[in-house]
Image (cartoon, rainbow, N blue to C red):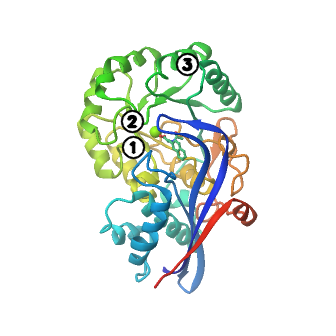
Amino acid sequence: MQITAVTLHSIGMPLVGAFTTSFKRQVEREALLIELTADVAGDSVTGWGECVALPDPLYSSEYLSGCAEVIGRFLLPRLVHHDVTAETVQHHLRPVKGHRMAKAALEMAVLDAQLRAAGQSFASYLGATAARVPSGVSVGIHDTVGELVEAVGGYLDAGYVRIKLKIEPGNDIEAVRAVRTEFGDELPLQVDANAAYTLADGPHLRRLDAFNLLLIEQPLGEEDLRQHAVLACQMTTPMCLDESIVSVESAADAIALGAAAVINVKAGRVGGYLEAKRIHDLARANGIAVWCGGMLETGLGRAANVALAALPGFTLPGDISASDRFYAEDITRPFVIEDGHITVPTGPGFGVEVIPERLRQTTTATTQLSLA
Ligand code: NPQ
Ligand code: MG
């Protein structure tokens, strides 16, 4: 395809409730959407992408306004003079170091346009087999254990099949104990530290082994692969990596080092859905379970994540929640949870449409990028 126009849409959507992690308390989701129009065999087609970076570099080194700049100054100029396909975007962008969430958003928009032109759904393009995927939920840190237990109860009533608790030093053991005590040993339960601990906390973290957790996610720093391998030997709870896995190569390193028994796959964090598929295939070949992580995406990213999670190697419930976990109103049709699952879209592209009125209501800035 020949890219003919690219517009960046900055939007803001209030969260239905504050979402607190070890790195930040969030009450709003600011997001960056890419609207990309291209000429595909003489037809003009528009695809959409979503950049999952946060407004500040607290989850990873990328941040939204930086992504917008990198896309306009360094990434798009490398695509406009080529007849690109989704499969060649990463090749054209490889000379630019890092900026994986920015690259992923561009590849996503090209992929959506390509699939729409072909009349093909993302799920069928991936070779995904499942018609629906199990829905897990990420539960933030609460001021009191009582409020946390009440929140978890609400999500279980809503049908979520797996609970993930955000933890941090001082908000960990007692929170997990209270949820286990209230909902029993059979509840699929896991924790996510967002890199809030060090290896010196090993003896403390080992106390979590008493609670039959599915996994502990990213307890240590994103660059601490070897230390995760050491901690994995000290704990019986399976080690899961999130922030540390930024490419199929880093996934291979983590697996080889014994630093990851499970991998949280996020397309934005690894440079796109095609790289996410490669990590799925690698993990599957190594008998490593993967699940689809979430970045509080709008319905656009959520649609793509649901299709990704429909691949056979995604054997654990993902952080693919219903739209109303975070948003009173989405910018696409809402994703709803039915009997603990979310249905895989079957329409062309990612199978959802951006609702113009919702885009207008949530837009904070619109930037038409020059293709010169
Ligand atoms: C994680 N996601 O798995 C991330 C962390 C996270 C669902 O826990 C705005 C945008 C706020 C993305 C807060 C979940 C966010 C965010 C937390 C991602 O580590
Ligand atoms: Mg995480």
Residue placed under numbered mark 3 in the picture: 186
The x and y percentages for residue 199 are: 29, 27
Q: Residue at x 42, y 29 (%)?
A: 216
Left or right, 40 with reference to 364: left
Which is nearer the N-term, disc 3 or disc 1? 3
The x and y percentages for residue 88 are: 38, 71
Q: Residue at x 49, y 53 (%)?
A: 53
Task: Please tell me how many numbered marks the rendered image carries.
Answer: 3
Q: Is mark 2 in CB contact (under 8 Å) with mark 1?
A: yes
Left or right, 280 with reference to 137: left
Residue placed under numbered mark 1 in the picture: 243
Ligand 2 within 8 Å, label 1 CB: yes
Q: Secondary structure at mark 1?
A: loop
The x and y percentages for residue 45 are: 59, 77
Dot 1: few (<14), some (14–19), or many (≥20) neighbours within 10 Å? many
Q: Secondary structure at mark 2?
A: loop
Q: Residue at x 26, y 32 (%)?
A: 227
Spatial CA span between label 2 and label 3: 27 Å
Residue placed under numbered mark 2 in the picture: 195
What's the amino acid at mark 2?
Answer: Ala
Q: Mark 2 against mark 3, which lies toward the viewer? A: 2
Q: Which mark is residue 290?
A: none
- Frontmost residue, 131 versus 237: 237
Left or right, 217 with reference to 231: right
Dot 2: few (<14), some (14–19), or many (≥20) neighbours within 10 Å? many
Dot 3: few (<14), some (14–19), or many (≥20) neighbours within 10 Å? few
Spatial CA span between label 2 and label 1: 8 Å
Q: Residue at x 45, y 28 (%)?
A: 168
